[in-house]
Structure formats: C-alpha cells, structure tokens
Amino acid sequence: MSATRHQASGSGNPARLLDNVAQTLKNTYGTMVEIVVRDPGRVPCAETDAWRVERVLIELALSACGGMSSGGSLELFARIHRATQAIPAVVLRAPGDYVVFGIRCDAAATGPRARGPASHGRTACPFGPAGLRVAEAFCGACGGDLRLNTNVAGALAELFLPVAVGAGSENPQWLAGDSVVLVVEDDSIVRNVAACLIRSLGYRALTVGNAEEALEALAGDGRITLVFTDIVLGAGMNGVQLAAEVRKSWPHVAMVLTTGYDNLDLDGAMQGDGYTLLRKPYLRKDIGAALDGALTRLQADAACMRSGQERGR
C-alpha cells in the first residue's frame, strides 16, 4: 500500500507531523495495531518538506504493521540529537543538530518478516526492503542517515535529519506553533513554491490568487496570523492596497509584501508603514527571516499597546 501526500497538514511541526502519520495508520488498521505517539515537546523542524517526512514514515510504518497479523503496537516519536562526532551505525555528514524521527515496534510485531533474510546487509527487521530503500535514500539526500536497531525489544528505525536553519529551540514559539500564513500570489507556480517553503519552516499555509480572495479568507478564518502577498497581483486590488485593508480590518495580522520589480522604491515606505518587504528571488532563509521579523514586530506592537492601556487606567 502506498502512502498519499497530506495536503492538509502543511507544517513541519514534529508533533503535528507524527499525529498525521498516526491518523493514517489508525484509518488503515483500526484497532488491530495499537498506535502510540510520544509527545516530542519543543523539537524543532527538520530541513526538508514535512510531507516528505510523513511519506517516508508512513511507508516504514505500513510495512511494519503489515507483518502484525496477530496484532501489536507501534510507537512514533521525535527527538533532538546533537552530533559532535561520529557514532556507531550512523554516518552523519557534519556535526550539528539533527531531528530524529523514530518508529519502534514491540516484540509481538516482529513476525515472519523479522525472521527472514536481512536486506541491505542489515539485521533482519519488520520494515520492508522497499520502505528501507526509500528511507535510506531520503535521509542521505537530506544530509542525514537512517539507523536500524533490532537489539531492542522488537525493532527500531530512526531517521536523522538536519535541523532547519533558523528553527532551533531558541527561536520564538510560533516558529513551530500554530501560525497560519495566507499566501497571496497570482502566479500559480510562484504561489505553490512560496507555500511549500513556508510550510517547511513549520507554519501552516493557505493560498489564494488575488486580493479579493485574500479578504474572503481573512473574513472566514480567524487562525490567519500573517499575510504573505505579492505587490503586483494583476487585475483588481494590488498588494499595497490589500495591506492597507488588512491593517484597517485585521490589525492583529502581520504583513509581508514581496516584489520582483527593482524599479519599485518601496523599502522606506514599507518600513514606515510597519510592513516587511521581501525582494524576489528569495531563498527559504529569506522567507524565514521575513516572517520572523514581521511576527516579532507585531508582538512588540501588541505589547506596547497593552502597556499604554494599562498606564491609562
């Protein structure tokens, strides 16, 4: 059985990612297999798209659950690992922080497949060879590694993935929290790329193609905390006009405006209005800095307002 991409997940938040995987497994196997999710706490996001991590974990988990003809349990977890030097069975390309996503099967889960021949020269385990190949290739492409351990009760598979740039534990809580970013872009390709980059940073992202659709989304979804909009949006209201409308009707929503036109001298005006301007082409780290700065400014403005109100009492 192949895994499907979770269009609705849209976040690198490890807790939400594990919940998505667990829900897929529960929908597939019902109560035959007990699925346990260990709370990862404040584990940061990995430097890759969340849906890709979900797909690999689901492939591994489905192959393990497929061997549980008599039932069993499967535990999903995530933790942080700081690599200062090479460790046995894990070949990490560089020292640093890694997010580790793990799947642990109990002893009852190690059925006939676990007693069969080893794959890839590894100790036999309940994870199918196809899933292992995909996981190994994925981890290697991300600069991490796959670790298998069948010396524990049952079997353990761990994906070591580099921590996302700017997603360390010292960053603001919203980076891996529930912030929803509304992406407004009339070019569908640019819109989808921007949304994927934003999701990989740990945010949830919604997408619309023009300012009118953006206003409808804001009116109908109170979770939106930031609007990420292009300035030139084709026919109708442009991004600057949209930003003014958002400020008037939703002052608690932060704004990031983007443009690929060098002849638009907007930096000073944007800063004066309290908006963040991001020039195209932008990189993932540029988006992260822009979102972080806009939300930090919004939080600071809200704190100043609350302080002024308290002094006025």
Image (cartoon, helix red, strand yellow):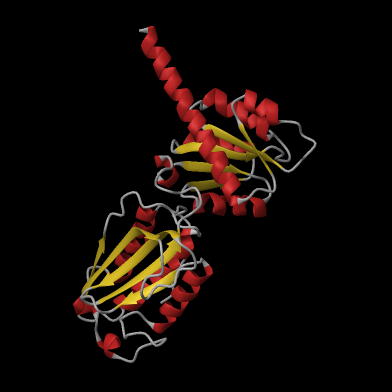
Q: Residue furthest front?
A: 85
Residue at image coords 29%, 65%: 26
Residue 258, position as x, y percentages in the image? 66, 40
> Which picture quadrant has residue 113?
bottom left
Q: Is residue 77 left or right of residue 8?
A: left
* Residue 218 visible within the image: no
Residue at image coords 40%, 72%: 90
Examine the rendered structure and indicate whether residue 66 appears above or below residue 9: below
Residue 112, position as x, y percentages in the image? 26, 88
Q: Is residue 282 left or right of residue 176?
A: right
Residue 131, position as x, y percentages in the image? 42, 78
* Residue 77 visible within the image: yes
State the quadrant of the C terminus.
Answer: top left
Examine the rendered structure and indicate whether residue 311 appears above or below residue 61: above
State the quadrant of the N terminus.
Answer: bottom left
Q: Observer-nearest residue: 58 or 101?
A: 101
